[in-house]
């Protein structure tokens, strides 16, 4: 258990090759499934998203758990986190983290069928500290979203992929 999250035992990988080797075929196999739910961690007191915690996506009962850490590390887990269990060990903080199924960026995707998953590698045209970081993109008929590295935490982008990303489409 890490960060007080039951079932969260991350294995952080660096670079497109390592992430594709470890998770590429399983991510690709999500295509054709519906996004049936998601969970993010928010603070009970103000509802703010705690972006350092994993984003959990449920595709017809197959859950993928995505968490960026440091400048270039990414952990992808499968069906391990219990989003019904209380998050513990944060008593020192004046805010209470809890699982939430509310996020305006993701809500419109629930019920939609996933058509494709890709890994995105950040390759900007100029010098950039984030060069080489990897994001995960989920493509649906109506739109797409990406879980990106926002420099030591997760970010959620919706819509067209930023042009500085190199897209690595995944196949089973």
Image (spheres, rainbow, N blue to C red):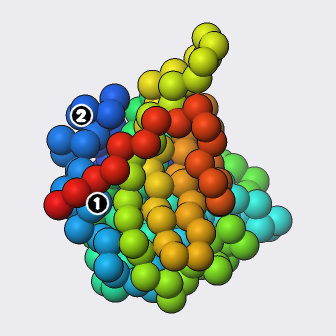
3D distance between C-alphas at marks 1 and 2: 14 Å
Name the outermost residue toward the right: 46
Name the outermost residue toward the top: 127
Q: Which residue is mark 1?
A: 27
Q: In the visual, does 48 lie left or right of 57?
A: right
| Quarter-of-image position of residue 27 | bottom left
- Residue at (60, 18) in percent of width and height: 125
- Residue at (32, 72) in percent of width and height: 31
Compare marks 1 and 2 and give the one earlier in the sequence: 2
Q: Is residue 171 visible?
A: yes
Q: Nearer the viewer, residue 7 or 59?
A: 59
Q: State whether residue 64 is above or below residue 89.
A: below
Q: Which residue is mark 2?
A: 18
- Residue at (41, 75) in percent of width and height: 114
| Quarter-of-image position of residue 15 | top left
Q: Are marks 1 and 2 in contact (CB under 8 Å)?
A: no
């Amino acid at each position: 258990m890490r960060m007080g999250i039951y079932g969260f035992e991350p294995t952080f990988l660096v670079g497109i090759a390592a992430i594709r080797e470890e998770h590429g075929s399983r991510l690709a196999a999500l295509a054709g499934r519906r996004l049936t739910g998601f969970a993010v961690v928010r603070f009970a007191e103000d509802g703010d998203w705690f972006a350092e915690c994993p984003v959990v996506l449920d595709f017809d009962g197959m859950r993928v758990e995505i968490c960026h850490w440091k400048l270039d590390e990414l952990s992808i887990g499968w069906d391990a986190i219990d989003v019904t269990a209380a998050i513990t060990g944060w008593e020192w903080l004046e805010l209470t983290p809890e699982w939430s199924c509310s996020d305006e960026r993701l809500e419109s995707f629930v019920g939609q069928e996933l058509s494709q998953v890709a890994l995105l590698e950040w390759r900007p045209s100029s010098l950039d500290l984030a060069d080489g970081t990897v994001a995960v993109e989920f493509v649906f008929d109506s739109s797409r979203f990406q879980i990106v590295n926002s420099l030591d935490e997760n970010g959620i982008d919706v819509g067209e992929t930023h042009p500085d990303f190199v897209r690595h489409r995944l196949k089973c």
